[in-house]
């Protein structure tokens, strides 16, 4: 378990222990636990909480008892029962997972958005039905009041053969789960930006397209927000009656919020290394009170809004300038959690906007990513001040705050589960956000014991006691050999057997077996080693001898360049 020190407290990385070789036998594992303290003190949060290559999405059921994780390769989902702390089932899919929505209280009703323009519905017994979308979907949301599954897509192409101009159009598909059919989609237009203008080689027509990037529904009121590629957040009121007529006024957004203009001039977006429009809205979320909203952009900015104003309360800048893929409110601590591929930034969402308005452009000086920290770091500071930065061992793609049956959304808990570009699902425990969920309440006891031990070590170091604990690593009993070394030893016939374990560009072999093979392959190696050692010792003795004193009169002077000879 790795510990990240912050001014506001410590962050415990629960999935940072050294990976154990899969080919290690159970007996070797038991012996390893006896002599390796790091392996013995490792923390297994959930059994098999990993994917073969990478994980893309993680969701927790509304009852707080199950965890659904989607990943690759091959594409699959895994369900974990938190009470048993183990995997319940695993299902393979036909395409990669883009998004996951839990429609019921538990794992019984799932909607999975695939990368092949399909939405798969799963029941407890397996795959129930599959529908196909007109265009590629990017994100999903479920509106409980109307039983509509909302899918934001890459946009609908509209051909224009005339000379006149045509606005780029985008659509949000609505699939009514009660009736089992598509409803009239939400539509929106943008005359400011055209995402794609291509030349059709057949019809010589102009193709215009405007896509959405993210979607969120407010948990308080029936309000849906769509973040689009043109940097605008559009809002629909799901309580308004919608007819099947395409000209219905309620199918178009009743409000447009220009986030791109508000965040213009902020951030560290580099056009040379990053592609796309920096003002594109890539993530959006509402808080539980229905008053505040956050929108993250491709340029690495997060704009915090009061729903009663079109001007942002604060704009938080991520110094990497990478797209913000997930934004989430944490009502228990009054903070906002925003994440780009490099880190999860925790910062205050409540406070005086006037006291922090002067910090909006100088906030990068307070970021720990550049080695400095804020003096006001911690909970309860001015709005926008940093509480902590959570850094992982691989790029993040999505995260949630895990909860339990009493708090399914994790608004009062401090456990983060992060998907990323590695096999393990990275997990972090942040006591500054709250206590651990009930299903892993042992984390509180472990962290308290660690803090007590750290206090005792600090006292002993102050007294002057310096003790060094010697530990062994997992691979000390094995020797790594390359293909050239195997050819030199003449053990090519062992390749493919359990005696040689393939790993990366070489093989692992047990040290005892390696010493025996080397003794047979090079029988005179010991004699050569002994002769070399004797020679080295003799040279050391000669160097330590006292050289005889030479008389200056008897010294023969050089005839040529005597000054240089001396």
Image (tube, grey):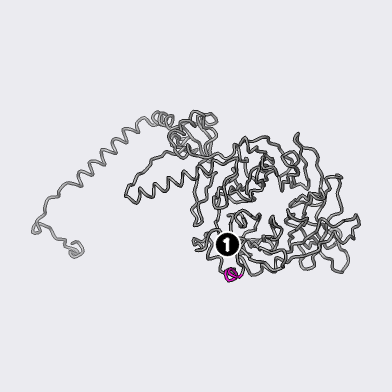
Q: Residues within 10 Å of mark 1 (few under 14, many from 20)?
A: some
Q: Magenta stretch? A: 354-359
Q: Is residue 337 highlighted in magenta? A: no
Is residue 355 one of those drawn in magenta? yes
Q: Is residue 37 above or below residue 154?
A: above
Secondary element under disc 1, as helix, strand or loop, is loop
Which residue has dot 1 on it?
Answer: 319
Left or right: where does residue 467 sit relative to residue 336? left
Give how far across and how far down residue 131 sits, in percent: 82, 44
Coordinates of residue 507 in the picture (x, y in percent): 50, 36
Identify the residue at horizontal 57%, vertical 50% (top origin).
434
Residue 366 to residue 133: above or below: below
- Front-lying residue, 503 or 249: 249
Return the x and y of residue 40 as percentages of the image width and height. 47, 36
Q: Position of residue 19 (x, y in %)?
A: 52, 40
Residue at figure coordinates x 55%, y 47% from the top left: 429
């Amino acid at each position: 378990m790795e510990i990240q020190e912050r001014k506001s407290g410590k962050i415990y990385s629960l999935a940072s222990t050294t990976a154990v070789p899969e080919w290690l036998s159970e007996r070797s594992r038991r012996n390893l636990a006896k002599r390796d303290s790091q392996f013995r003190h490792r923390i297994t949060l959930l059994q098999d909480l990993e994917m073969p290559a990478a994980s893309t999405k993680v969701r927790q059921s509304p009852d707080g008892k199950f965890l659904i994780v989607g990943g690759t390769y091959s594409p699959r989902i895994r369900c974990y029962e938190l009470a048993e702390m183990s995997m319940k089932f695993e299902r393979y899919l036909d395409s990669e997972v883009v998004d996951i929505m839990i429609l019921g209280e538990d794992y019984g009703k799932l909607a999975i958005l695939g990368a092949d323009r399909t939405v798969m519905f799963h029941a407890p017994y397996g795959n129930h039905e599959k529908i196909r979308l007109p265009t590629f979907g990017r994100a999903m949301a479920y509106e409980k009041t109307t039983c509509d599954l909302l899918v934001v897509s890459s946009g609908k192409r509209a051909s224009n053969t005339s000379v006149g101009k045509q606005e780029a159009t985008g659509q949000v598909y609505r699939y009514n789960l009660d009736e089992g059919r598509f409803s009239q989609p939400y539509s929106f237009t943008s005359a400011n930006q055209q995402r794609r203008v291509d030349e059709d080689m057949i019809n010589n027509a102009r193709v215009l397209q405007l896509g959405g990037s993210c979607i969120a529904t407010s948990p308080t009121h029936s309000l849906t927000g769509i973040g689009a590629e043109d940097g605008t957040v559009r809002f629909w009121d799901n309580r308004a009656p919608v007819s099947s007529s395409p000209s219905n006024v309620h199918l178009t957004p009743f409000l447009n919020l220009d986030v791109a203009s508000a965040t213009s001039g902020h951030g560290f977006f580099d056009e040379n290394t990053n592609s796309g429009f920096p003002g594109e809205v890539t993530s959006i979320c509402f808080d539980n009170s229905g008053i505040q909203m956050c929108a993250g952009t491709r340029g690495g900015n997060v704009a915090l809004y009061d729903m009663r104003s079109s001007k942002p309360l604060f704009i938080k800048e991520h110094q990497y300038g990478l797209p913000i893929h997930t934004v989430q409110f944490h009502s228990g601590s009054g903070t906002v959690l925003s994440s780009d591929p490099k880190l999860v930034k925790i910062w205050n969402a409540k406070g005086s906007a006037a006291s922090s308005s002067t910090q909006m452009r100088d906030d990068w000086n307070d970021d720990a990513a550049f080695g400095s920290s804020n003096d006001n770091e911690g909970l309860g500071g001015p709005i926008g001040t940093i509480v902590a930065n959570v850094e992982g061992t691989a790029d993040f793609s999505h995260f949630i705050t895990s909860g339990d049956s009493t708090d399914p959304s994790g608004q009062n808990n401090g456990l983060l589960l992060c998907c990323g570009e590695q096999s393990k699902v990275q997990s972090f425990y942040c006591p500054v956000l709250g206590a651990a969920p009930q299903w892993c309440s042992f984390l509180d006891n472990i962290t308290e014991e660690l803090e007590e031990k750290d206090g005792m070590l600090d006292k002993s170091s102050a007294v002057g006691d310096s003790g060094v604990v010697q530990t062994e690593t997992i691979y000390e009993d094995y020797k790594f050999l390359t293909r050239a070394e195997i050819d030199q030893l003449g053990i090519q016939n062992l390749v493919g057997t359990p005696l040689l374990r393939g790993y990366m560009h070489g093989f692992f072999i047990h040290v005892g077996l390696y010493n025996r093979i080397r003794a047979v392959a090079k029988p005179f190696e010991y004699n050569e080693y002994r002769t070399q050692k004797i020679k080295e010792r003799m040279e050391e003795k000669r160097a330590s001898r006292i050289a005889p004193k030479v008389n200056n009169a008897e010294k023969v002077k050089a005839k040529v360049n005597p000054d240089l000879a001396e």
